[in-house]
Amino acid sequence: MIAWETFPHEADIGVRGFGDTLAEAFAGAALALTAVICDPAKVGACETAAFECAAPEDELLLIDWLNALIYAMATRRLLFSRFAVEIADHRLRATAWGEPIEAARHEPAAEVKGATFCELAVKKLPDGRWLAQCVVDV
């Protein structure tokens, strides 16, 4: 099960993903991103989108990943509820499952404009799990 949470940050919202692996933490951050917009449990998984990102370090890779999702949501008018992420050598490959936005059913609460460097952290926690977090501009 993917672990995630959102956290308040002045006028914006933070997203956090946790996982036994770096890839699971990135998937959790993606699910938290959806939660900024609507309840992820209301989003079906009938369409797929493929993603590839690369960056010189994990923190920048997280920003690229979340911004790729934000771009896909805006241009394809989709919300995502499930993620399969693979990360190796600062390269991410992922599949996201979701469905077209239906305002009456999804009740979107915010529009995410982009992932920021504020509160940016990708690290292994003392308990051995991974954390991936940043603040998103809404």
Image (tube, grey):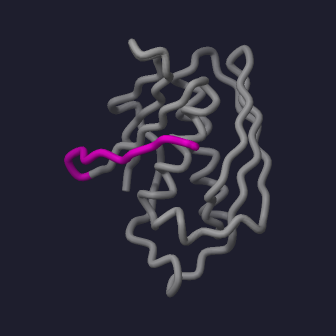
Placement of 30 over or under 78, stated as above or below: above
The magenta segment: 1-11
Pinpoint residue 121: horizontal percent, then vertical percent. 41, 24
Residue 34 drawn in magenta: no
Pinpoint residue 37: horizontal percent, then vertical percent. 45, 63
Residue at the spot 72% in from the left edge and 14% down from the top edge: 89
Residue 9 drawn in magenta: yes
**Residue at the extreme left:** 10
Q: Nearer the viewer, residue 9 or 21?
A: 21
**Residue at the extreme bottom:** 104
| Quadrant where the C terminus is found in the figure | bottom left
In the rendered view, does 61 fall on the left or right side of 110? right
Residue at the spot 39% in from the left edge and 66% down from the top edge: 110
Placement of 22 over or under 24, stated as above or below: above
Placement of 45 over or under 54, stated as above or below: below
Pinpoint residue 10: horizontal percent, then vertical percent. 20, 47
In the rendered view, does 84 fall on the left or right side of 121? right
Placement of 104 over or under 19, stated as above or below: below
Pinpoint residue 112: horizontal percent, then vertical percent. 45, 57
Residue at the spot 40% in from the left edge and 35% down from the top edge: 134
Q: Nearer the viewer, residue 22 or 112?
A: 22
